[in-house]
Amino acid sequence: MTIPDYAALLIDAGEYSGYADISHVFPRLLGLAELKLNRGLRVAGMENTEMVTLTEGDGTLPDDFLEAREVKNASGIPIRAVSLEQLTNSYMDRSGTPAGYAIVGSTIKVRPTADQDISVTYYSKIPALTVTDPTNWLLEKAPDVYLFALVNEIAIWKRDVEAATAAQQLMLLAINGLKIEDERARWGNAQMVVGGVTP
């Protein structure tokens, strides 16, 4: 299955749902579908790495930030995620090499405090499809995910419970397929390492 762009997705979603009169609400339904996908989907296509500038240990996260994968200090050493309370209690007002971080809203707080650039590898929001940005990595890689997410939103909008349930099941199957493909690409020939003392 291929859906090349925004316009084709509009047509296919109308055909699959059985409701062709959706063009006036399509941007809103598409936005809702993308919102729900951003809440639960975490695959390689969503990963980005950005440098974040810290001032007194605080930095502003990228606008498309969803969830951190790895944070490294200026020396390239990974910093561990901790609760905000632990971050405050463990490091108080000390300055030095960052060792822990917590995320508060759109701010990353790193302690001990430092003025430096840190590397943040994170899951980013799916780039929104629009008339002017008609395609993105998800539409290219998994058009079925987009299609069934939209068909689900159309059925909800039309108050068709049976169609919404069927579309949701198809969407979940498509998402599971994408996740399996992602896991195989990441871990396909990885070796298992058993920790601890071996006899």
Image (spheres, grey):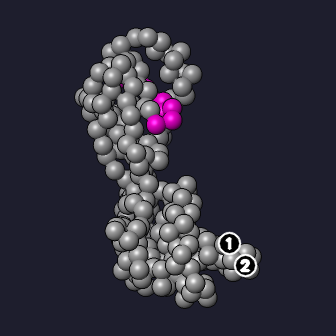
Q: Does residue 37 appear in this view?
A: no
Depicted 195 relative to depicted 18: above or below: above
How far apart in space, not on screen, are marks 2 and 1 (Cα)? 6 Å
**In the image, what residue type sits under mark 1?**
Ile
**Residue corresponding to mark 1:** 156
Please name the residue shown 51% across and 57% down the image.
Answer: 38
Please name the residue shown 61% across and 88% down the image.
Answer: 18
**Residue 103 is covered by the magenta coloring:** yes
Which quadrant of the rendered structure holds the N terminus?
bottom left
Estimate the x, y position of residue 149 in percent, counting from the top left: 56, 71
Question: Is residue 19 rendered to the left or right of residue 111?
Answer: right
**Residue corresponding to mark 2:** 160
Depicted 108 relative to depicted 68: above or below: above
Please, what secondary structure does the residue beneath circle 2 have? loop
Disc 2 packing (10 Å; few <14; some 14–19; many ≥20): few
Q: Give the range drawn in magenta.
A: 97-106
Give 176 or 127, whichever is nearer the viewer. Answer: 127
Please name the residue shown 52% across and 63% down the image.
Answer: 31
Q: Do the residues labelled 2 and 1 touch (CB within 8 Å)?
A: yes
